[in-house]
Amino acid sequence: MKNNSKIISFIKNNMKGVGIGVVIICVLYIIIAGEYGYIAQTHLETNLQQIEQQINDAQIKRDSIYEQIMLLNNSNELIEKTARELYGMKRKDETDVFVIKREVQD
């Protein structure tokens, strides 16, 4: 009980200093860990970088698909090859289609 009364008397005698200390602690908390603080900002920047990378990957994939579409629009042979390899399609006069896949070695 004696320690509590010492703390209370210290706070009463140094009210201005304690108030300033509390304000400084609150401001530091807001700057570091608040809703718009350093930690939140770092987290948002990391998320932004990940989303930008996903956008870049999607654009590369879109460009690749667009290029394939352009090639297929301009080449009957490529359409036939794709139909045979991917979908096992055949011409009316053929009986069976065999696709031989080879492993690519790097």
Image: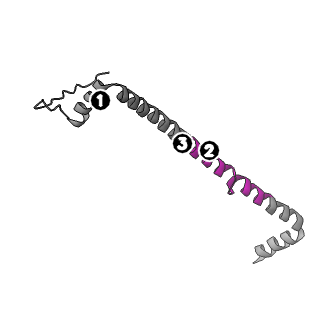
Residue 33 at what x, y percent from top left? Answer: 68, 55
The residue range painted magenta reads 24-49
Q: Residues within 10 Å of mark 3 (few under 14, many from 20)?
A: few
- Element type where label 1 sits in the image: helix
> Which label sits on residue 45?
2
Identify residue type, mark 1: Ile
Q: N-terminal of the two: label 2 or label 1?
A: 2
Residue at 47% x, 38% y is 58
Question: In whole angstroms, how far apart are the C-alphas of marks 2 and 1?
Answer: 44 Å
Answer with the quarter of the image where residue 22 lies: bottom right
What is the residue that sits farthest to the top in this orientation?
106
Quarter of the figure with the C terminus: top left
Task: Between residue 47 and residue 76, name the one nearer to us.
Answer: 76
Q: On the picture, is 79 further left or further right than 95?
A: right
> Which label sits on residue 79?
1
Residue at 68% x, 49% y is 38
Residue 77 at what x, y percent from top left? Answer: 28, 24
Question: In whole angstroms, how far apart are the C-alphas of marks 3 and 2?
Answer: 9 Å
User: Which residue corresponds to mark 3?
Assistant: 50
Task: Between residue 59 and residue 30, name the one nearer to us.
Answer: 59
Residue contact at pointers 3 and 2, CB within 8 angstroms: no
Depth-wise, is mark 1 or mark 3 nearer the camera?
A: 1
Secondary structure mostly seen in the magenta stretch: helix
